[in-house]
């Protein structure tokens, strides 16, 4: 997977911008606020039509502009391809792949793949379950387009059921609609849980090896997928998982009505992360937290490379500056197989150790 070039128009602080990229390493340098992360955001937008920083398309459109566009030429699946995304406030985004208009964002899944690591990804260890679910869902959606479609349908059903639970005291007739949404959430939830649990197994195998190398054998990283209490085996057949979900949902129906919100289902699942057999969320030091998060991301990158048959693009946003020289070297040596983008305020000799190209960004343009 190699992105050859990108052209931006009215995207964040970029007016009209175009540049080519090195097929190996691209070091993007510049002052904070100049547009380094915005450029990575534009590249990441190509993976699933969404930003990793906001859910609102209007925030991606330059101030006082009516639209924004991202056009890219890349190599994937043994062919040269082109992808264009146009954002207009208040309208659905327009997506064209190789000149063909896509009907839904879900159709982008797997066309262009990338793995991002940014400072906020430390939340993978420290924050609540939502961050870890998002991490799983983003990776699996790039690998399995059908999962992306099931996830979209599940989230839509979740939102509709939540609205019913919120409004039913004022409109009791709404409760008659719950059965259909419950069945959707049970059926699709079984798909999500089993697929996530399988991914979690692969992730543990890869992350354990990375973390051991990273720490010189001092730390052991392990993972456990957690679903609702009735789902004791998230790797069981989907039909069995569905029955366990139905059992849990039925036992929580009265509580959901009283709370006026969903209290059960795959939308609350989690990965529990252990470091040396202790919960990393509670016991990992700051350095161990950073190493564990990086290990998960590098493991994600390696899993995608194995399953896709080519390395996804790797985006490292202001990460290496937080590591000492030895840990920087470990990461740089580990990622030598594919195309990489690294942002930093100053080069600090990184380009000399990686080769490739240095792009100096200032005020939404090349310096």
Image (tube, grey):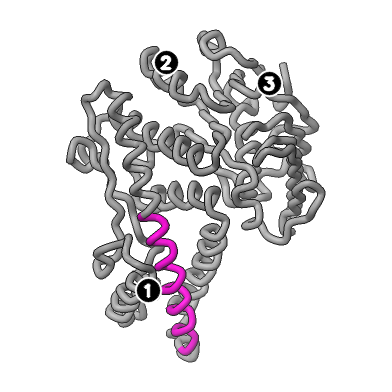
Q: Residue at x 67, y 43 (%)?
A: 60
- Residue 316 visible at all: yes
Picture quadrant of residue 320: top left
Label 2 sits on residue: 329
Vertical position of residue 60 compared to residue 158: above or below: above
Sequence-first tag of 2 and 1: 1
69 part of magenta stretch: no
Residue furthest toward the left? 277
| On screen, residue 329 above or below 116 | above
Distance of mark 3 from mark 2, alpha carbons? 27 Å
Rendering coords of residue 79 (x, y %): 72, 39
Secondary structure under the numbered disc 3 in the rendered image = loop
Q: Nearer the viewer, mark 3 or mark 2?
A: 2
Read off the magenta span.
Answer: 176-197
Which callout, 3 or 2, points at the residue further toward the start of the chain? 2
Residue 239's label in the rendered image is 1
Position of 320 relative to 273 (above/below):
above
Q: Nearer the viewer, residue 13 or 273?
A: 273
Q: What residue is shown with label 3?
A: 362
User: Which label belongs to residue 259?
Assistant: none
């Amino acid at each position: 997977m190699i992105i050859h070039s990108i052209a931006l128009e009215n995207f964040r602080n970029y007016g009209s911008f175009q540049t080519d990229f090195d097929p190996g390493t691209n070091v993007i340098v510049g002052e904070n606020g100049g547009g380094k992360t915005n450029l990575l955001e534009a590249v990441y937008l190509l993976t699933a039509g969404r930003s990793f920083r906001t859910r609102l398309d209007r925030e991606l459109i330059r101030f006082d502009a009516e639209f924004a566009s991202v056009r890219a030429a890349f190599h994937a699946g043994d062919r040269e391809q082109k992808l264009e995304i146009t954002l207009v406030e208040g309208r659905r985004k327009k997506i064209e792949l190789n000149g063909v208009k896509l009907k839904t964002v879900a159709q982008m899944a797997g066309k262009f793949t990338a793995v991002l690591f940014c400072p906020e990804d430390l939340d993978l260890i420290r924050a609540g379950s939502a961050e870890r679910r998002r991490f799983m869902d983003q990776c699996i959606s790039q690998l399995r387009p059908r999962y992306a479609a099931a996830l979209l349908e599940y989230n839509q059903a979740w939102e509709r059921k939540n609205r019913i639970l919120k409004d039913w005291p004022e409109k009791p007739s709404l409760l008659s609609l719950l059965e259909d949404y419950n069945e959707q959430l049970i059926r699709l939830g079984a798909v999500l849980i089993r697929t996530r649990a399988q991914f979690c197994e692969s992730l543990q195998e890869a992350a354990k090896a990375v973390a051991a190398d990273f720490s010189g054998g001092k730390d052991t990283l392990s993972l456990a997928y957690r679903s609702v209490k009735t789902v004791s085996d998230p790797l069981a057949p989907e039909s069995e998982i569905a029955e366990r979900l139905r059992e849990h949902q039925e036992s929580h129906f009265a509580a959901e009505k009283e709370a006026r919100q969903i209290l059960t289902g795959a939308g609350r699942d989690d990965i529990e992360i252990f470091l040396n057999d202790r919960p990393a969320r509670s016991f990992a030091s700051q350095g161990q937290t950073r190493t564990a998060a990086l290990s998960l991301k590098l493991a994600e990158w390696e899993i995608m490379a194995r399953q896709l048959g080519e390395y996804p693009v790797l985006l490292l946003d202001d990460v290496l500056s937080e590591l000492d020289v030895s840990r920087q070297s470990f990461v740089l040596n580990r990622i030598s197989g594919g195309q990489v983008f690294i942002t930093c305020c100053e080069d600090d000799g990184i380009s000399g150790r990686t080769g490739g190209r240095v792009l100096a960004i200032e005020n939404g343009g090349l310096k």
